[in-house]
Structure formats: structure tokens, C-alpha cells
Image (cartoon, rainbow, N blue to C red):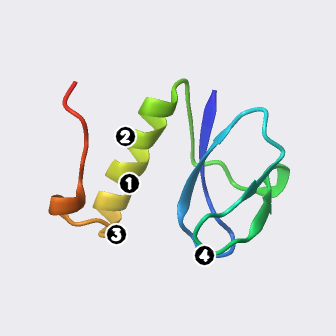
Amino acid sequence: MYFILPCYGCGNLLIVEEEQKTKRCPYCNCLLNLSKTRILRRVSTSREASRIVREMKLAKGCVSDKENLIEKE
């Protein structure tokens, strides 16, 4: 199981495995305690998590259509 959550330092979306207890944000270097972080979505595969993060960033306007690299299934 994978979780999608926002960094509480910079707000960027991150993907973490269920077993992880902490995660360092690659964008702002903030160390997140995952037990205190709001989980936005739970998904079963890393591929599904990546697709959802791309869609969320696109909907939020963080990624332009040219940068959207959603794989065709």
C-alpha cells in the first residue's frame, strides 16, 4: 500500500510506502513524521500513486500539459 500526502514544509505531494515512519522531502529537505501527516489518498501500487500525483498536480496548475507524462494504459 502507498500513501499520497503533502509535505508540511512546502506543500509538494509525496508518495510513501505504508511501512515508512519518516520521509525527507526532496524539495525542501523537511523531515516528515508520517504518523502526524494528513494522508490524501491510499493506493495499492506505486504506478497508481504516480499517476494520481501527476493528475493532482495538473488539476492544481502545478504542471503544464507539455510536462504531463501520463502513460497510456
Question: Crowding at label 4, few (<14), some or many (≥20) Cα neighbours within 10 Å?
Answer: few
Name which of mark 4 and mark 1 comes first in the sequence: 4
**How far is disc 4 from disc 1 in space, using C-alphas?**
16 Å
- The residue at 19%/31% (across/down) is 72
Residue that label 3 marks: 62
Give SS at disc 4.
loop
Name which of mark 2 and mark 4 comes first in the sequence: 4
What amino acid type is highlighted by mark number 3?
Answer: Cys
Q: Nearer the viewer, residue 20 or 5?
A: 20
> What numbered label is drawn on residue 56?
1
**How far is disc 4 from disc 3 in space, using C-alphas?**
13 Å
- The residue at 58%/48% (across/down) is 40
Give SS at disc 2.
helix
**How far is disc 2 from disc 4 in space, using C-alphas?**
21 Å
- The residue at 63%/26% (across/down) is 1
Q: Are marks 2 and 4 in contact (CB under 8 Å)?
A: no
In the image as oriented, which residue stretches furthest toward the left? 66
Does residue 71 appear to the left or right of 42 in the view shown?
left
- Where is residue 50 drawn, in percent x and y? 43, 41
Does residue 33 appear to the left or right of 47 in the view shown?
right
Name which of mark 3 and mark 2 comes first in the sequence: 2
Does residue 39 appear to the left or right of 68 in the view shown?
right
Question: Crowding at label 3, few (<14), some or many (≥20) Cα neighbours within 10 Å?
Answer: few
Residue that label 2 marks: 51
Question: Crowding at label 2, few (<14), some or many (≥20) Cα neighbours within 10 Å?
Answer: some
What amino acid type is highlighted by mark number 1?
Answer: Met
Q: Quick check: 49 above or below 26?
A: above
What amino acid type is highlighted by mark number 2?
Answer: Arg
> What numbered label is drawn on residue 10?
4
What amino acid type is highlighted by mark number 4?
Answer: Cys
Name which of mark 2 and mark 1 comes first in the sequence: 2
